[in-house]
Structures are given as C-alpha cells and as structure tokens.
Amino acid sequence: MSQHVHVRLNHGLAVTEQGELAELSRCHCGATWTSTYRVEDGEPEL
Ligand SMILES: [Zn+2]
C-alpha cells in the first residue's frame, strides 16, 4: 500500500458547548476528523 496523504476538505464548522471552535474535515477516501480550537476571550485585532 502506498502512503496516502489525507486531503483536508472543509466539511463544516461548529462551536462546542465549551465555546471551542470545531472544524470538521474529511478526505475523499472517507476519513473524517475534527480539529478543535480554543477561542480566546476577545476578538483578535485585524
Ligand atoms: Zn485520505
């Protein structure tokens, strides 16, 4: 089997009850995973 590098396709965004940002991703091979980010208090300056 050759090494397969997952392609992260944005599958959606959600906010957990803990206030974390959850990024849902999936690959065309069927793999899915969730990346969570802790949202700091306060908006970042842009
Ligand atoms: Zn994959």
Image: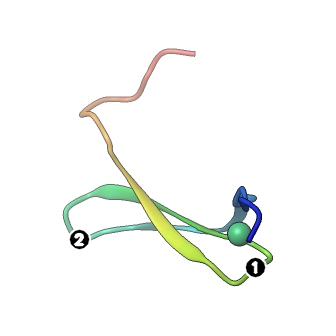
Nearer to us in this view, 18 or 37:
37
User: Which amino acid type is shown beneath numbered disc 1?
Assistant: Cys
The structure residue drawn at horizontal position 24% and vertical position 34%, both measured from the top left corner, is: 41
Establish whether ligand 1 lies closer than 8 Å to the Cβ of label 2. Answer: no
The structure residue drawn at horizontal position 27% and vertical position 34%, both measured from the top left corner, is: 40
N-terminal label among 1 and 2 = 2
* Identity of the residue furthest to the bottom in this view: 30
Is residue 4 shown above or below 28? above
Q: Position of residue 43 (x, y in %)?
A: 40, 29
Q: Position of residue 27 (x, y in %)?
A: 72, 71
Within 10 angstroms of label 1, few (less than 14), some, or many (20 or more) residues?
few
* Identity of the residue furthest to the top in this view: 45
SS of the residue at dot 1? loop
Within 10 angstroms of label 2, few (less than 14), some, or many (20 or more) residues?
few
Mark 1, residue position: 29
Nearer to us in this view, 5 or 8:
5
Establish whether ligand 1 lies closer than 8 Å to the Cβ of label 1. Answer: yes
Quarter of the rendering containing residue 24: bottom right
Residue 17 numbered mark, or none = 2
Dot in front, 1 or 2: 1
* Identity of the residue furthest to the left in this view: 18
The structure residue drawn at horizontal position 69% and vertical position 84%, both measured from the top left corner, is: 30
Answer whether labels 1 and 2 touch (C-beta < 8 Å).
no
SS of the residue at dot 2? loop
Residue 14 numbered mark, or none = none
Is residue 9 shown above or below 26? above
The structure residue drawn at horizontal position 77% and vertical position 63%, both measured from the top left corner, is: 2
